[in-house]
Every structure is written in structure tokens, then in C-alpha cells.
């Protein structure tokens, strides 16, 4: 038992969506400090709460040296998701803070939304929905997915699931990955190609790469220019991978027919983001992983990781 231990949970809706995980933590003597703001916590809000916590279940908030200095008891950060681009891993290591994530636990949810965004962009579903609700009867001639070439920039857990789901649409699937899983690609009937070829040959490009220094603005003016004229672009990875100004120009110039994005360079996104003035883009609020199943799976994983770390029983390997 970890009587007297405290965990700060910065992801939202923890009590509502992770009841079993919360009960498990509390039954093991943990006190839970929750994020009740309904959004990522600000630096000041984190600093006000982190002073005496032993562990963190981190959402999309930023974890830096400044935060670590204010958290002398912090021993582990369990990322409530996969991406750790919001955590200064090196600073955490210097202070002996373990960082673990929930690899694969949200892959299906993100893959399903990726498919949904492809279809929404090709058939203009959100705009038609809004038009009908406002009494309109606008018609829209869209494109079918069948027979198209879909390019997956990234063939990790999410990319492989997207490929598996696309198999029923009778499409040709290309993929680029710096460290490709060739066995998985062969099993999924995916053709591995260089990124330049993928961009040039794909009717639909799905961005599924991790956010790293070397992938910052992976999609920029040059890479958008390499895409097929009239192609579609979908991003359910991270906003930092895309130069939003370049994306906007590709959409307004007609280079791209449409785009659908779930992530942004700055989050939460501002209402005055220039992308929101463009008609042929569909936007969602970084919600790809937010399903009841994901919250249950990731909640259980992060709770167990923290408990194991403090009990010393098969502690998780840090990043």
C-alpha cells in the first residue's frame, strides 16, 4: 500500500471515464488530484498543484524543467496516451523521474477517426450536415475512396490499424516509415516506398508519424507541392508536423481538394486561426483517441504503471 501518496491527473474527465482505475488507485492508498478545468492545465495551474505529488498521469499539458523543480517528490510520469512531445524527457531523466506512455492503447480509436476524416473530407459530410440542420438542401458531388491510392506517412501501431481497416475499401495502400515493419507491411498488403514517392502517387495522404525534432514541419511548402494535384490530406498525429500556413496555401490554391485535421501547432486552438477561414478543411479538437474504450484501457495501464513503480513489482521501463 502507498498510504499518503498523491497522484496528479491532468487529463480531463478522469472520475467519469476511468472509474475502475481511480478505484484501484484509491484502494491502494493513493490520493488523486484531478484536473477539473475541462482542458489542458496551464503552467501556473500545474505549479500550484505539483509541489507534493509523487506521480503524475499527464494529459496534453507541458512538463518542463521548471515544473520538475517545483516537484521534488515526483518519481514517475505516466503519459495518458502515446505521444510524449509535451514532456522534456532529458530533464526528467536528469532528475530521476521515470516517463512511461501507453503505446498501442489508443491505436484503434485514432485509426477509426482517421478513416472517418477521410470519408468526411471526400464527401463533405460536416458541411452537408450543417446545411440540412439550417433548412438548406445543398448537394455536393464528392469523390469515392474505392480504387484510390492511400498513402500512410507512418506505419506504427496506428498506421497498421488504418491499413487493416482500409483493406475493405478496395484501395492501394502505400506507406513510408523511417524504421518500417516489413513483415507487417507484407501481411497488410502495404507497399513501402520513400516519402517522396508516396506524396506524388497518393490520392489521400494520412499523417501518422511521431512528433520528433526531425519530423517538425514534415509537411511544409515543399512537401505539399510534391503531392498529387487534387489530393486529400488528413492529420491525426501532431500539429507540430505541419506548417499550417503551407497547408492553408495548399488548400486555397486548389493544390489540395480538401483536408481534415484533428491537431494543431498550438493547442487549445484559437478561434482566429487562419485555417478556420478556409471552407475545404474539416477540423476536430484533438479528439482522435477519445473513446470510452481508450479511457478504460489507458486508465488501467497508467494506474498499473504507477502502482508497479512504487511496489517494485515489474516496474515499467522508462522512455
Image: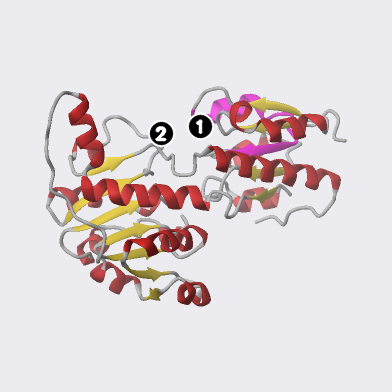
Q: Quarter holding the C terminus? A: bottom right
Q: Which stretch appears magenta?
A: 39-58
Q: Is residue 246 above or below residue 164?
A: above
Q: Nearer the viewer, residue 146 or 122?
A: 146
Q: Residues within 10 Å of mark 1 (few under 14, many from 20)?
A: many
Q: Total number of numbered labels?
A: 2
Q: Which mark is residue 261?
A: none
Residue at 66% across, 49% down: 99
Residue at 51% across, 72% down: 184
Residue at 75% across, 36% down: 54
From this viewpoint, is residue 105 visible? yes
Task: Say which quarter of the image contains residue 6.
Answer: top right
Q: Which mark is residue 40?
A: 1
Report the side of 24 relative to 243 (left or right): right
Q: Which mark is residue 268?
A: 2
From this viewpoint, is residue 243 visible? no
x then y, percent, for residue 266: 38, 39
Q: Nearer the viewer, residue 161 or 49?
A: 161
Amino acid at each position: 500500500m502507498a498510504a499518503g501518496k498523491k497522484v496528479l491527473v491532468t487529463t480531463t474527465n478522469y472520475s467519469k471515464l476511468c472509474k475502475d482505475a481511480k478505484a484501484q488507485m484509491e484502494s491502494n492508498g493513493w490520493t488523486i488530484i484531478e484536473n477539473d478545468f475541462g482542458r489542458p492545465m496551464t503552467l501556473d495551474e500545474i505549479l500550484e498543484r505539483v509541489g507534493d505529488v509523487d506521480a503524475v498521469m499527464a494529459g496534453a499539458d507541458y512538463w518542463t524543467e521548471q515544473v520538475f523543480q517545483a516537484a521534488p517528490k515526483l518519481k514517475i510520469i505516466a503519459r495518458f496516451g502515446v505521444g510524449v512531445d509535451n514532456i522534456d524527457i532529458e530533464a526528467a531523466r536528469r532528475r530521476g523521474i521515470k516517463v512511461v506512455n501507453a503505446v498501442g492503447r489508443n491505436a484503434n480509436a485514432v485509426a477509426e477517426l482517421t478513416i472517418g476524416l477521410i470519408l468526411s473530407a471526400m464527401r463533405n459530410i460536416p458541411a452537408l450536415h450543417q446545411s440540412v440542420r439550417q433548412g438548406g438542401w445543398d448537394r455536393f458531388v464528392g469523390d469515392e475512396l474505392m480504387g484510390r491510392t492511400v498513402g500512410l506517412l507512418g506505419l506504427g501501431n496506428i498506421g497498421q490499424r488504418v491499413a487493416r481497416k482500409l483493406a475493405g475499401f478496395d484501395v492501394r495502400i502505400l506507406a513510408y516509415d523511417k524504421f518500417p515493419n516489413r513483415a507487417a507491411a507484407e501481411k497488410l498488403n502495404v507497399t513501402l516506398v520513400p516519402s517522396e514517392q508516396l506524396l506524388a502517387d497518393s490520392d489521400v495522404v494520412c499523417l501518422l508519424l511521431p512528433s520528433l525534432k526531425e519530423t517538425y514541419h514534415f509537411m511544409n511548402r515543399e512537401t505539399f507541392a510534391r503531392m498529387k494535384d487534387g489530393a486529400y490530406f488528413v492529420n491525426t498525429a501532431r500539429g507540430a508536423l505541419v506548417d499550417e500556413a503551407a497547408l492553408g496555401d495548399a488548400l486555397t490554391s486548389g493544390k489540395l481538394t480538401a483536408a481534415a485535421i484533428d491537431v494543431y501547432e498550438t493547442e487549445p486552438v484559437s478561434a482566429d486561426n487562419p485555417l478556420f477561414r478556409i471552407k475545404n478543411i474539416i477540423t476536430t479538437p484533438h479528439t482522435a483517441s477519445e473513446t470510452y474504450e481508450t479511457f478504460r484501457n489507458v486508465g488501467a495501464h497508467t494506474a498499473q504503471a504507477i502502482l508497479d513503480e512504487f511496489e517494485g513489482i515489474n516496474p515499467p521501463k522508462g522512455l
